[in-house]
Image (cartoon, helix red, strand yellow):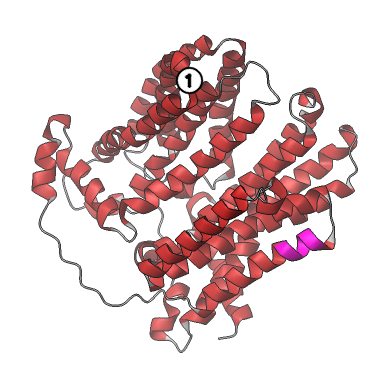
Amino acid sequence: MPVPDLFCAMMKEEWRMHSTIFGSLGFALFPAVIAVFALLGSLTLPLFADVFPYDVVALFAHALFLLMGVMVGSFGLMGREFMNRRFGQASLIAYASRSLPVSERRIFGAFLVKDTVYYILLYVLPFAAGFAVATPFIGLDPGLAVLAFVSLALAFLLGLSAVCFLSTLYARSVTLLAGTATVLAVLALAAFRLGAITVSAVLPPYAFFLDPAVEPLAISLLLILVPAAASVLFVTVDYPDRTKRFKNSLDPLAERVGTLGSAHFIAKDALDLLRSEGGAGKVIFSFLLPLGLVWVCLRVLIRFIPGIDPLVVFAVLLGVISATIYNWLTEFDSFTSYAFLPVEVSEVIDAKLKSYALANLLPLGVLVLAAATSGGAGTFFPALAAFASVSAYTLAVTVYLTGLHPNVMLYSAWVFLRYLLAISPALLLLIFASILDPAYAASSLLLVAPAALLLSRGRMKWQAWEMPGY
């Protein structure tokens, strides 16, 4: 089958999966929500121009799309789970190499192109379109939106190709991946000592946005095309038939958490994460990477916003990012696997919440480490209150709006809009209040009450809902 045919079939398949669940209109309007929020955000740029210079905002936008590319590129690391659990139910195309004379390399190449086009249409283009509409009202050249679209797409593809390449190395050999990571770390350290590391050198698409010359464009394309080509050439999704054997740890693990209730569900969640491809490392990787990026951005913001407490703002954002752990806990699980047991949806949700609480020891440790290394011990308790409250509230909104299916339901325009409207005002109010006085972050405890209410209603709301078949 030619690659263009595979590409078209995969695009149709992606559309079918989402439109079957929440309707064609609900999925088609998702980019419109992105465009509207990009428009509203762009219109506020002049108001904060003294605090957030345009080049700093552009840096954050490019860092954000780089991070999105990294997340999408993690397919290689989780390919086995996706193939077996997601595509095994939803997609026959990804399995075509096992039943039809279509090579894995061709399938993966088409898949990479499909993901590139799909996510650019879903995120990058709407974002640039919203910015383009705003430019006449904020005194910027509309042509800047075209440049932003190109550079943001390059930033996204840079993250996508880099992680695809590293994931391919991981699939081939963990030793090869470790060796490559070591070499890159040594080169980065040497460049840092020589003073050769600059923002433009690390992020060529951003350099291209600031100065649309041939050199940063060529470097960006080189850094995208070479790893992407290597990933396609050496891809392997048909892992060796390794038989894994484990001791029965379910009951011993359940005994350890027996006092929490839902012990066997919690133990199952832990075993699912630990024994899946990549183990708990993939969760830690996907969790710590954005946190590192947030911390670097906050260190930059300190120069522009007097009075900002980086630990408190970091704690607020840490609470939001921590809520994505719930997505991981529900990623590889489905209520249909419990359908033949005397188990209700609310019981499974309760178990996920308890697993989430235990998993939140990791971000709590990150917060303690950040406080200890940044000299922010004086604001630790307001930061701790902000982290715990925001994490609980964001989780409650996620459970109420998406039940056990956050990874799918958030692609509904209506659900995504309500998610943003429920979380964004509270976060912005909390961050601005903490700039006036970091102690005001403790007021975030007011979020606990609505969080409890949303969780209670969410448990009942999803009791009778069933995921539509693809």
Where does residue 29 sit, x and y in percent of width and height?
Answer: 64, 47
- Outermost residue on the front side: it is 194
Identify which residue is drawn at 69% across, 47% down: 198
- Outermost residue on the bottom side: it is 101
Which residue position holds label 1? Answer: 376
Q: Quadrant of residue 458?
A: top left
**Residue type for callout 1:** Gly
Q: Nearer the viewer, residue 345 or 446?
A: 446
Where does residue 456 sit, x and y in percent of width and height?
Answer: 34, 26
What residue span does the magenta drawing correspond to? Answer: 215-219
Where does residue 386 sit, x and y in percent of width and height?
Answer: 46, 20
Look at the numbered disc 1 and give the secondary structure of its residue: loop
Q: Residues within 10 Å of mark 1 (few under 14, many from 20)?
A: some
- The answer to whether 332 is drawn above or below residue 435 in the figure is below
Identify which residue is drawn at 8% across, 45% down: 252
Numbered label tally: 1
Q: Quadrant of residue 84?
A: bottom left
Lateral position of residue 78 relative to residue 145, left or right: left
The quarter of the image holding the C terminus is bottom left
Is residue 397 inside the magenta stretch? no
Lateral position of residue 173 relative to residue 166, left or right: left
